[in-house]
Amino acid sequence: MTIGQQVENILKASKRSRSDDKELFIIYMQKWGMALSDIQIETFRRMPSFETLRRVRQKIQQAGLYLADELTEKRRFEKYKNVKQQISFSDEVDKLIDGWSNK
């Protein structure tokens, strides 16, 4: 079963997971065999989201602090290039983006 199918099954079964990513993560982790206690679940619900943590890490690293190892940086850059190619911006939008990055 693909990740997409797994997530769809959770969304189908749990209305709360449709509006709350943390609930989706909790159910997903439990489906993968993590026996989360009630205290762990409540702690997880109070924590900032994974996306918030990722964005803060990214912002700190963009400032040149606490950089990832070279292999990780290379993989991130390759993912960035692939996503940019898939989006296939028009030349004018690409020029605008390039202008922003050069400021």
Image: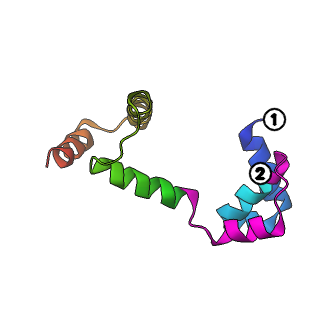
Of marks 1 and 2, the one in the foreground: 2
Residue at position x 82%, y 53% from top? 30
Residue beneath the point at 38% across and 32% down? 77
What SS does tag 2 mark?
A: helix
Residue placed at 27% from the left, 46% from the top?
64
Q: Nearer the viewer, residue 94 or 45?
A: 45
Q: Do labels 1 and 2 touch, CB within 8 Å?
A: no
Give the colouring mode of the picture: rainbow
Which quarter of the rendering shows the N terminus? Answer: top right
Of 15 and 78, the residue lying toward us: 78
Instruction: Residue 86 in the image: state x and y as whole percent.
Output: 44, 33
Does 53 sit left or right of 35 as displayed?
left
In the displayed structure, 50 sits above or below 87; it is below
| Residue 39 counted in the magenta span | yes
In this picture, is 60 found above or below 44?
above
Element under disc 1: loop
86 is higher (above) or lower (below) than 49:
above
How many numbered marks appear? 2
Q: CA separation, marks 1 and 2? A: 15 Å
Q: Which residue is mark 1?
A: 1
Q: Which stretch did the figure color magenta? A: 29-50
- Spot the residue most to the left: 103
Residue in front for this viewpoint, 49 or 92? 49
Tell me the amino acid under the disc marked 1: Met
Which residue is under mark 2? 29
Residue 11 placement (x, y as % from top left): 77, 57
Camera-side residue: 41 or 91? Answer: 41
Instruction: Tell me if mark 2 has few (under 14), some (14-19) or many (20+) residues whose alpha carbon lies within 10 angstroms of its own.
Output: few
Query: Looking at the image, is mark 1 or mark 2 earlier in the sequence?
Result: 1
Q: Position of residue 102 (x, y in %)?
A: 15, 44
At label 2, the amino acid type is Met
Q: Is residue 22 left or right of residue 50?
A: right
